[in-house]
Structures are given as C-alpha cells and as structure tokens.
Image: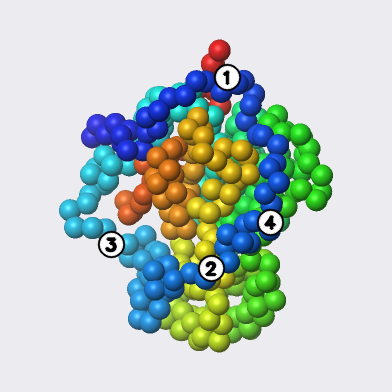
C-alpha cells in the first residue's frame, strides 16, 4: 500500500495561540441575524462563473455525476490522488496535531456523509449508531448540519435538536432548540439565524409545481421541494431519458432568469441566483458563534458532493481547519483529506470524541 502523504502544509494553521478556556465553545448569539445575511447575499451571481449549467454542457454534466461516467485528469490514478487527499482516519494524528490548542467546530453534510446515497431520497435515513456518533460530537464540539435538503426535512432525519441546521444549501439556518453543553437556550425569536432568499419563496413554489407536472412524463424522475431550492432527482431515470429530462428542466427555467441550475450526484439543483452557498453558511455560522477573526478555531467540514466544495474553498482560503471529502473515487477537490463512506465518517467522529475525552 502506498504511504500516504503528510498533512499539507498550506492546510495547517501555523500560528498556535494559547489554549482556549475549557468548555468555551458556543458563545452567545451575536446580534447579527437574518437581516445581515440577506444584505450579504443581495448581489446576484455572475452566472458565467458560477457553475451554472448551460447549453450542450447539461447532458455531459448529468453523465459526470454518475461514477461510471466520471473522467479524471490524465495520469491521476488512485494512489496519486490518495497522496494528495489522504484518509483522515489513517492520518488522524496529523489532524489532531493541526488542531492542537484550538477549538474544533464541526460541519457535516447529510446525504452521502451521514447516510448512504439511496434511490429514494425520502429513504435516506441515518443509522442509530451514526446518530449516537453525531450526538457525542455535539457534546464536545459545536456542530452544524449543512445540507441541500430543506432544514425541516434534514432535522427530521437527524433528530438531534442540539445541533445547528443549515438547509437549502445554507439558505435556511437555525440554531439549537434545546439546551446543549455549549450554549444557553435562546428565545424563539433568536432561533432563526439566516434566511437570505425569502423573496424567492413564491417563485420557487411556482417552479416546483410546474416541474412536478412536467416530470410526470419521465418514469423515475422526482422533484423535491427544499423550501429555498429544488432538486430534480434522476437516479432512477433510464439514461436514455436524461437528455429529455434536462431539456425540460432547462426550458422551464428559461422563464426565470433569477434562478440558476447546478448539478449534484444524479440530481439537478435549482437555486436563487444570489451570492450564497455552503461556504457562506460556514462563514456566517463561525461569525455568529463569535469565531470571526480568531486564530484559535479549527473548523472541520465533511461532505461528499460538488456543493460542499464551496465550504472546502472557504477553509482553504482561511488557512484554518480542514475539509474532508467522502468518496470512493478520485475527484477534483479542494478538500485536504478523504474518507470512503459514511461508515468511515462515523469512525472518524468517534475517534475525535475519544481523543477529546482523553485530554487533560
């Protein structure tokens, strides 16, 4: 087996501040709430540079979301890729060394990270063992679930009210509704932290109804309403129907210039064309929790999809924390580390909790 490369120097936090005070994880909410995140997201995206699927690229992008169609850069084999993105389990001591003296903040995607990818999106339940691992992590570190799913839906899957939830690719953020080890219970007025796309709710509902009717003619297609965004799932659609599905989705969106179309793992995502994604959600949560501008914080973001790259890039640009990509196949990524599947995510979370329990 190839020896994995050491933790990349540019990913590590070089400055080591004095250790944080014990138990000082979740600060009280700052007076920065939804009004501020809406202001930050007001600018419309540059569609040419935002990964929007246009023209003939749509079918190619849909095929690229299928592992058997995936193409990698010339000369990039699995061993080379693992040298650049080693397993965070096998390099666990390097992760701990980089986090030494800093406060860990955990960010977790849901589908493909805490639960396996399944044919029916409504059946993507997490195991009790995984739920127990996430619960344990939240007892030691501030923890947020960041998902493309609607916030209420992912909360229903996870069933842990002591976490932060950022649904709709970060466009719907809410804090814990029960007392945790890290913060006092907040009033109901303070629970919703960020909803920068509320003005798009009527048009999202309109497009959802139109697309739902259109997709009835394509066996296996499913349109999921995630409140501030929509997902058109084609995992159960025969490949010869993909082009027709994509063309129908694109035709509907021609009448909605303020919406953009991107792709995930066998899913087309329809989102408002605002400057907000999972990376913005990560930044917003860190600032709302009092970590902005601090060098004693170590965010860890674990995700499996293209949309998680926005968060990985934020961490890379911050020069703090690490991104961990969940995948069995080499992919282009800004993440520093990798894990193969949700079972390894669970093992990593348990090791992190165990290591924290042995300190002091």
Residue at label 2? 43
**Proximity of marks 1 and 2: CB atoms separated by less than 8 Å:** no
Instruction: Tell me the SS state at disc 2.
Output: loop
Pinpoint residue 319: horizontal percent, then vertical percent: 40, 40
**Residue projecting furthest to the top:** 360
Q: Residue at x 23, y 35 (%)?
A: 2
Compute the Cα span from label 2 to label 4.
16 Å
In the image, what residue occupies the spot 56% across and 52% down? 281
From the top left corner, tell me how far across and down residue 197 is, in percent: 64, 66
Seen from the viewer's position, the closer of residues 5 and 12 is: 12
Residue on which the image places disc 4: 34
First along the sequence among labels 1 and 2: 2
Q: Secondary structure at mark 3?
A: loop
Distance of label 3 from label 4 (alpha carbons): 40 Å
- Mark 2–mark 3 distance (CA, rounded to whole Å): 34 Å
Tell me whether the residue at label 3 lies in contact with that at label 1, contact meaning CB atoms closer than 8 angstroms. no
Toward which corner of the image does residue 252 lie, by quadrant?
bottom right
Q: Secondary structure at mark 4?
A: helix
Q: Which residue is mark 3?
A: 71
Viewer-proximal residue among 240 and 338: 338
Closer to the N terminus: mark 3 or mark 4? 4
């Amino acid at each position: 087996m190839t020896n994995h490369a050491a933790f990349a120097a540019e990913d590590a936090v070089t400055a080591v501040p004095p250790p944080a005070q014990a138990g000082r994880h979740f600060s009280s909410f700052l007076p920065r709430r939804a009004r501020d995140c809406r202001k930050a997201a007001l600018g419309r995206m540059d569609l040419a540079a935002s990964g929007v699927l246009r023209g003939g690229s749509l079918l190619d992008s849909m095929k690229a979301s299928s592992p058997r169609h995936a193409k990698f850069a010339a000369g990039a084999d699995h061993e080379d890729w693992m040298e650049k993105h080693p397993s965070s389990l096998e390099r666990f001591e390097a992760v701990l060394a980089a986090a030494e003296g800093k406060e860990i903040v955990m960010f977790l995607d849901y589908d493909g990270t805490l639960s396996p990818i399944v044919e029916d999106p409504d059946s993507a339940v997490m195991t009790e063992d995984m739920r127990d691992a996430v619960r344990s992590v939240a007892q030691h570190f501030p923890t947020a679930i960041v998902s493309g799913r609607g916030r209420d839906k992912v909360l229903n899957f996870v069933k842990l009210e002591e976490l932060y939830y950022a649904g709709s690719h970060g466009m719907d953020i809410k804090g814990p509704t029960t007392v945790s080890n890290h913060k006092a219970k907040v009033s109901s007025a303070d629970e919703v932290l960020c909803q920068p796309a509320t003005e798009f709710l009527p048009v999202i509902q309109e497009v959802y109804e139109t697309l739902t009717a259109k997709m009835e003619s394509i066996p296996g297609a499913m349109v999921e309403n995630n409140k501030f965004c929509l997902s058109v799932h084609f995992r159960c659609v025969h490949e010869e129907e993909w082009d027709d599905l994509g063309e129908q989705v694109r035709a509907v969106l021609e009448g909605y210039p303020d919406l953009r179309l991107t792709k995930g793992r066998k899913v087309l995502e329809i989102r408002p064309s605002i400057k907000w994604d999972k990376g913005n959600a990560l930044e917003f949560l860190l600032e709302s929790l009092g970590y902005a501008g601090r060098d004693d914080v170590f965010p860890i973001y674990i995700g499996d999809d293209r949309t998680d790259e926005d968060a990985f890039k934020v961490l890379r640009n911050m020069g703090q924390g690490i991104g961990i990509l969940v995948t069995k196949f080499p992919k282009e990524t800004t993440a520093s580390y990798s894990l193969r599947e949700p079972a390894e995510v669970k093992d990593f979370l348990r090791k992190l909790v165990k290591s924290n329990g042995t300190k002091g």
